[in-house]
Image: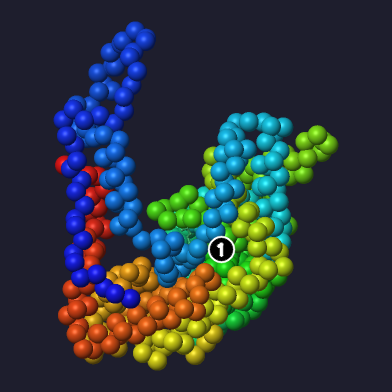
Amino acid sequence: MTIVANKPEPIIYELSSPGRQGAALPACDVPITQLPNHLIRDELKLPEVAEVDVVRHFTRLSQKNYCVDLGIYPLGSCTMKYNPKINEEAVKLPGLTGIHPYQSADDTQGALQLMYELQEMLGEICGLPGVTLQPAAGAQGELAGILIIHAYHKARKDTKRKKVIVPDSAHGTNPATSSMSGYEVVQVKSDARGNVDLDELRKIADDTTVGLMLTNPNTLGLFEENIRAVCQIIHDAGGLVYGDGANLNAIVGVARPGDLGIDILHSNLHKTFAVPHGGGGPGAGAVMVTKQLAQFLPGPIVVKGRLMKRPYELAMPRKSIGRVKSFYGNFLALVRAYVYIRSIGKEHLAQIAEDAVINANYLLARLKGVYKAPFGNRVCKHEFVLTGTPFAEKYGVHTLDIAKRIQDFGYHPPTIYFPLTVPECLMIEPTESESKQGLDEFADTLLKIAEEAKTNPQLLHDAPHDAPITRLDDVKAAREPVLCYRG
Ligand SMILES: Cc1ncc(COP(=O)(O)O)c(C=O)c1O
């Protein structure tokens, strides 16, 4: 792969030219009235640009972007896999794009059938028969899940439960969700193999335990080897087990969370089931629960109708926690997930997990001799973690430098400094989309960068060399974001 030597032109934002117009309106054929003064904001300096200026500006911006349609996007924990284009064909069907959420069930039987079948498929894939498609993202699914657990304990008049146990290898949204729901978060440590430490868990779980939130496979890319024992300890204490199923692509078609003891699970349909989710959405975080918990699901959900002429209906579960999203969730995200599952077919779903796992293990095997892999002695699932500590200690090259240098080779960097339990962490998820050739090219690049760290650390400190903007002050950007352009 070649490195472009010339610095790209910076993007010019100030394109406004007095008098230039983007739209030609026909002559006014209604009486002209004055807008109320409070609606007129003179301070808004709207750019005066032609349509072609706008199109070129945004096209130029889009070409600066990196996306999964350009190359490997190994952003661990985010499952940036290829989203097949047939999904996009389906969402363009006028019968799906043209319907309105206020249309009656009689009018929208096709859409309801699709949602019903998706509920059924997800229930079967996860081994948890109650399903809601409402949540718009994984984190929202988690919130719905904890509210369901809350409703379950309340219905049993068990009000002394106050704490949610969260392993230190959990995704950050798990403790955030628990605390947002008003519960105390109690952390349980991982053992040397990266599993939940069972002795610690036994000490913590008691009759004040609401439940446990378990990311499995966890953020180290490891499958919880003692999952049945973990669930048993929580159930014995009277709590429920919430499974963070964002990493379902590592086990889909091979293992069903419900069979392992999980009571409630969300799946990021926008990850495992190939719905685009760059730029913050829109996603879909379906929640699956045991039969016993189905009465608490947020609704409406789709049920089989009683009338021949209306086979599908919307219904609110008996003790529903209520709505968590307007209408029925992000419908077109659901359509994409449905098409993905149907086009792969039930009998081939396991191939997703097998390919995701073999790709991650292949890349790990190629890198672990040079980059240190803290759990390199275990088979990983869909992703794995490396630590850049040796480079930091020997050459003063940090993980951030490595990530920035990766950009010079035309790749999106992996997730860095997460999970927090691994110092100088690089978290890599190649996904099942990549060919061996693609994996080899990426591995060669990382090995080359490791060599550069030794021989020319400054090259890494100054990277990226090739981007319109080089090093940003990441902390300042997060603390004092400037989200609005002003000329
Ligand atoms: C393990 C895990 N849990 C939860 C989430 C949150 O999902 P979302 O971004 O859809 O809210 C993510 C997102 O990347 C994740 O990786």
Colour setting? rainbow
As drawn, 163 above or below 190: above
Q: Quadrant of residue 202?
A: bottom right
Quadrant of the rendering where the C terminus is positioned:
top left
* Neighbourhood count class around disc 1 (C-alpha, 10 Å): few under 14, some 14–19, many 20 upward: many
The residue depicted at 29 percent of the width and 82 percent of the height is: 449
The residue depicted at 20 percent of the width and 70 percent of the height is: 5
**Residue 74: image location, x then y, percent:** 42, 70
Residue linked to disc 1: 272
In the displayed structure, does residue 196 sit left or right of residue 6? Answer: right
- The amino acid beneath tag 1 is Thr
Decide if residue 312 is in sight here: yes
Q: Give 315 or 15, whichever is nearer the viewer.
A: 15
The residue depicted at 54 percent of the width and 71 percent of the height is: 432
Q: Give 457 or 261, whichever is nearer the viewer.
A: 457
As drawn, 254 above or below 177: below
